[in-house]
Image (cartoon, rainbow, N blue to C red):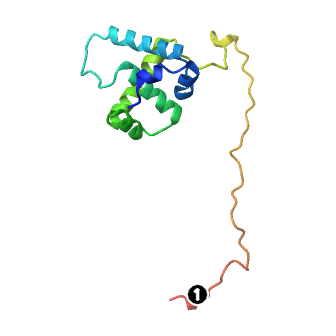
Amino acid sequence: MPDITKLLKQSDAGFKRYTGIHKTTFQAMLEAMQDHESSKTKSGRPSDLSLEAQILLALTYWREYRTLYHIGIDFGIHESSASRIVHKVENVLINSGQFDLPRKLPRGNGEDVNWSAVIIDATETPIERPKKTKATTTVEKRSDIP
């Protein structure tokens, strides 16, 4: 498992190089996760990983595109647990409303958007097949076939 304290002691450039985000973004993610954990009414079995490790696990999955099996081995948990943690972190961060990808379309009313598009019909394309010629086909006599 990666040493989180050593990672947090790195410079912002080193931290970003490892995780893909700034330390301030990581702290905002941690606060969103802590808010979610404190708002829970029922508590199930606690996770073996701290909230920092859970965020780091999700960041590792998103940044490196490694399999959950390999990430699970690095963090000392099962592959299915790693999958649940990634989905949990995704859902908490999306529902917090603080973390959003940039949008190409403006927010707001759909009537305000100028919808112009070009539609290309590419469904009728010829299929490339070898041409049947006398040289490529073999003619058999019916009497020669058993």
**Residue 121 appears in the rendering:** yes
**Which residue corresponds to mark 1?**
142
Q: Position of residue 49 (x, y in %)?
A: 33, 24
Residue 57 lies in what quarter of the image? Answer: top left
Above-or-below relation of 5 to 31: below
**Quarter of the image with the N terminus in it:** top left
In the figure, is residue 79 to the left or right of 111?
Answer: left
Residue beneath the point at 40% across and 20% down: 52
Residue beneath the point at 53% across and 13% down: 24
Q: Amino acid at mark 1?
A: Arg
Residue at the outermost bottom position: 143
* Disc 1, SS: helix
Q: Position of residue 9 (x, y in %)?
A: 47, 19
In the figure, is residue 51 to the left or right of 48?
Answer: right
Nearer the observer, 96 or 145 = 96
Q: Position of residue 82 (x, y in %)?
A: 37, 32
Q: Position of residue 50 (x, y in %)?
A: 34, 21
Above-or-below relation of 12 to 83: above
Above-or-below relation of 9 to 75: above
Q: Residues within 10 Å of mark 1 (few under 14, many from 20)?
A: few
Residue beneath the point at 50% across and 12% down: 97
Above-or-below relation of 112 to 83: above
